[in-house]
Image: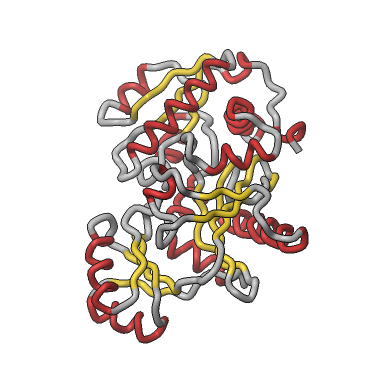
Amino acid sequence: MSNVLQSTLAPEAFGRVAVLFGGKSAEREVSLKSGAAVLEALQAAGVDAFGIDVGDDFLPRLAGERIDRAFIVLHGRGGEDGSMQGLLECAGIPYTGSGILASALAMDKLRTKQVWQSLGLSTPRHAVLASEEDCRNAAAALGFPLIVKPAHEGSSIGMAKVGSVDELIAAWHAASKYDSQVLVEQWIHGPEFTVAILRGQVLPPIGLGTPHSFYDYDAKYLASDTQYRIPCGLDAAKEQELKDLTARACEAVGVRGWARADVMQDADGRFWLLEVNTVPGMTDHSLVPMAARAAGLDFQQLVLAILADSVEQRR
């Protein structure tokens, strides 16, 4: 698979590349780490790359710098939700990853679920919370346990597993600090998997394990006891089913270039789609680099492949 995925472009073919990271979202700290890793890899490969911590001075810098191409490593709102993609489109600057519509759609967990449901793709039952009465109604309709999440955040920020109405109300209030729209989903009992897409190819799935109640922010970025299984532990038929489902889910959203989907499997072996990340993490704890290694790509080759797609898809 690696020969298909690897970039064949010379470093100078990319021109002057701006690596966009940081920003103002709740995922800023993760983005800073991702951006530093991507920038280091590009420069080591001979690409004329420089970094921009996206802040209040971004528009003047965009106008003042010569930028031939942008590598977006902004996680969360302001970078992963279509707004940066729209700005770069208007500026005529090619960029990595998905376009405006797919970025905005994937960032909205509710709309993503609605698209999947319309196509018959399995995603957990859910409700939208806007009041304590909504919390009580959701508890009656969905049962416990439940998972509460802001509709427009990533990295498990603002998420909580709850087992009672009181816990649900408290979690709704906590999640509301991050987002005006809060979702609650039926809890799926079983293993969790994450599956990356790169240049139209599905990379080897990763099985996740953690002693935490779920794969939260600490388990993703800080903990040393998180388990990553590659191979993922499924038999060949089930693994192919998981990969096919992920490909359909990403196609439904309109993903381009690279992405990562999170999926649960219940006790009956059925898979349930959770969400799609269109600018996944690229830190030393991140999952896409792990999946790429399993497919035969080191970190530098992965970064070059993502960047090459921005050339080939936009010719």
Which image quarter is the C terminus in? Answer: top right
Residues 43 and 210: in front is 210
Residue 278 visible in image: yes
User: Residue 166's spot in the image, x, y percent?
Assistant: 24, 76
Residues 221 and 212: in front is 212
Relative vertical location of residue 282 with respect to residue 276 in this rendering, above or below:
above
Q: Residue furthest bottom?
A: 140
Which image quarter is the N terminus in? Answer: top right
Q: Where is residue 267, by image quadrant?
A: bottom right
User: Residue 49's spot in the image, x, y percent?
Assistant: 49, 18
Residues 195 and 24: in front is 195
Residue 134 visible in image: no
Q: Residue at x 25, y 30 (%)?
A: 56
Q: Is residue 212 left or right of residue 44?
A: left
How are the colours assigned in the image?
secondary structure
Relative vertical location of residue 111 with respect to residue 194 in this rendering, above or below:
below
Q: Residue at x 44, y 40 (%)?
A: 86
User: Residue 197's spot in the image, x, y percent?
Assistant: 63, 46
Q: Residue at x 48, y 34 (%)?
A: 284
User: Residue 274's spot in the image, x, y percent?
Assistant: 51, 62
Q: Residue at x 47, y 23 (%)?
A: 39
